[in-house]
Amino acid sequence: MAGAPAKARRDRRERGDRVIDYVPIGLQLMVAFLLAGALLVLSTVLGRRPGSRTDLSPYECGVDPLEPAGKRYTIRFYMVAMLFILFDIEAAFLYPWATVFRDMGLPGFWEMAVFLGVLVAGFLYCWRRGALDWD
């Protein structure tokens, strides 16, 4: 019974220590919010004002758009986008793989062979659909 108050004090002290651990995070968040607010206020106060009605239009050149914004695109646009993604992914994965090729051994080689097979299949699909024909 005599040890119960001492245990309660120890528990409160340990909880207090845990709260103190979060003080740096709170300070960092507070500084981040203050800095963001200060930058927004400064950019509003010191920033340039729009010069004319033309500057506020979607096209600053002053020429009215010729076609509606909701115009449908041809499949060729999407095929070019697919080719870009295809080769972008290939480059993103081939360079790191080449740096650790010897460490990966034969299983790493076969995994990359499957990956390149999928890329080649996508490339052939785009080629057959005529995405590489620039008329």
Image (tube, helix red, strand yellow):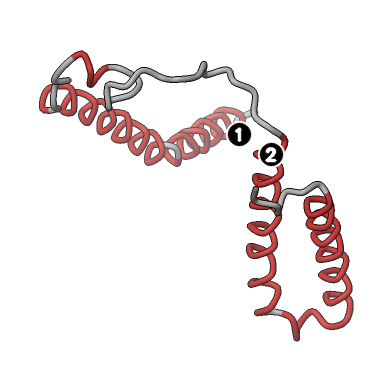
Viewed as shown, does residue 107 lie left or right of 42?
A: right
- The quarter of the picture where residue 55 lies is top left
Q: Residue furthest bottom?
A: 102
Relative to 76, say whether 127 is above or below: below
- Whole-percent x, y for residue 120 in the image: 82, 62
Decide which of 53, 103 is in the foreground and name it. 53
| In this picture, residue 114 sits left or right of residue 41 | right
Question: In the current view of this chain or complex, which residue is farthest to the left?
Answer: 46
Task: Determine which residue is flagged by label 2.
Answer: 78
Q: Is residue 97 left or right of residue 120?
A: left
Is label 2 in a helix, a strand or a loop? helix
Q: Residue at x 60, y 30 (%)?
A: 2
Tally the marks. 2
The residue sitting at 64% across, 23% down in the picture is 72
Residue 74: % across, % down = 68, 32
Q: Which residue is mark 1?
A: 3
Q: Position of residue 99 (x, y in %)?
A: 65, 79
Identity, as a three-letter code, of the amino acid under mark 1: Gly
